[in-house]
Amino acid sequence: MHFDLVSGDTICAISTAPGMGAIAVVRLSGKDAIAVASSIFRPASPKFDLSGAEGHRQYFGRIMDREEVLDEVLVSVFRAPKSYTGENMAEISCHGSIYIQHRIMELLMERGARPALAGEFTMRAFANKKLDLAQAEAVADLIASNSKTTHQLAMKQLRGNFSEKIAQLRQKLVDFVSLIELELDFSEEDVEFADRSQFQQLLSEMQGEIGRLLESFKTGNAIKQGIPVAIIGKPNAGKSTLLNAILNEEKAIVSEIPGTTRDAIEDTIIIGGYNFRFIDTAGLRQSDDLIENIGIERTYEKIRQASIILYVCDMSDCQGVAAEEMLEEFLHLIEDESKHFILVGNKIDMLDQTPDHFRDFVELETIFVSAKRKENIHLIADSLLNAVKRFALNADTVVSNARHYHALLKASESLATVQQNLQSGLPTDLVAIDLKQAIFYVGSITGEIHTEEVLGSIFSKFCIGK
């Protein structure tokens, strides 16, 4: 997809979701946007002319198809540079009829506007410096947000928290590379304007800041995609029944036959403003069934990907020696201390009393439930919320975008090369090359440095009309 950053075209698009609703919005942007809207708009006051209207105001009138009244509308006027795109803009709020929406688009195109490309309004906001590239991507995240936490994350980035941090990092690098280049201008006089020990300290500090940002991606990505919760355990422990109970729907097939679940089943649910992605997995056991073994291998892969693991055990078949064997197998799975494990003792409806003494065998958090009767399921929800507090957005700057993560990773690699070169006593001009590479990668995050290919990739993912 090609974007012309200096296009003078007037663009138009239906900005509301496809389909019929009470109200729809058709928006225009460009030097002639207000004039084009005025050409099909007949104001309620005969003496009023929309083309000369004051900005940040709404005006009532009719959309005319020659002498035929198409609809009664409100037109919002925004004048450059005080608009979303930084250009003249008009937004027509009409009734939600699909016919009316498309007829207004046809009339606007007859008057000289052209259909907008996906993301072109935000692209123009970026080109006119109303937003940087990271903030523009936050707009897409805000539109796609489906929980309180994803909304908070997008709003923080849209307000510029992340961009400000990146700008500070880039400025420190630019300041130092300017001193190094000054040294090159006076290379014959053998002078140093940049203190090498201070530079090493600055590099270490910057690597620490970038490292913290890279580490935050695990949190940001989990919140954005849904915090992954793997439900694991032996066959017939009640994993699928538990998933259905948590989701409150028959998502997974439930059967008394061991090995029914042969592949991971996923679904999401919002609990307390957090988006959890539950993964029901194949039962862990030795099997001669090739297909079931593939499912078991995928279970181990899901365990590696999950942030929280619910280990489900059948309490009706897990007493004494069996309990010790189960716990030994369970503890063997714990290889990553960053994961939060919750032991779920299921099928307590088949016992005379809840086996509270079972907690003596294990130090891990343990919850007793009956997935079949949906008893104590709320305790799992409470435990998940407590566990996810470490994912809370306490930090001002959290990386949630994969493009930003990879750019920071490349910047970190370039800075590591700079550190090595300084320690090796390499010439200043060689040090400057890698330093400029780091500046390039950091600058690419906010769009200080960009290519048409990158812009096309980013904005093509936007909806048309935004």
Image (tube, helix red, strand yellow):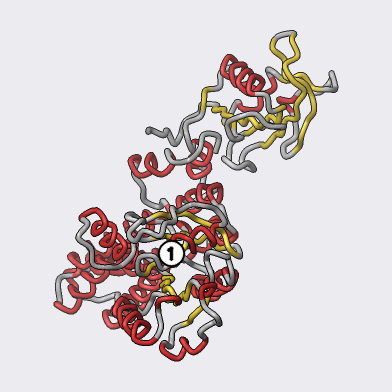
Location of residue 247 (image quadrant): bottom right
Q: Of 315 and 336, which appears nearest the observer?
A: 315
The crowding category of the residue bearing disc 1, from other C-alpha atoms within 10 Å (few below 14, some 14 to 19, many at least 20), is many
Image: 236 above or below 39: below
Image: 78 above or below 220: above
Q: Of 328 and 454, which appears nearest the observer?
A: 328
Residue at the image point whose x is 35% and y is 56% from the top: 260
Question: Residue 87, percent across and down?
Answer: 58, 36
Left or right, 162 with reference to 421: right
Residue at the image point whose x is 51% and y is 47% from the top: 140
Q: Mark 1 = which residue?
A: 239
Question: Residue 25, percent across and down?
Answer: 65, 32
Question: Residue 167, percent across and down?
Answer: 44, 62
Name the quarter where the C terminus is drawn.
top right
Question: Residue 35, percent across and down?
Answer: 65, 23
Q: Of 97 and 281, which appears nearest the observer?
A: 281
Q: Amino acid at mark 1?
A: Lys
Location of residue 215 (image quadrant): bottom left
Q: Can you see residue 310?
A: yes
Left or right, 352 with reference to 454: right
Assign a secondary structure to mark 1: helix
Left or right, 84 with reference to 52: left
Residue at the image point whose x is 76% and y is 34% from the top: 58
Q: Can you see residue 167?
A: no
Name the quarter where the N terminus is drawn.
top left
Residue at the image point whose x is 37% and y is 83% from the top: 323
Q: Residue furthest top?
A: 67
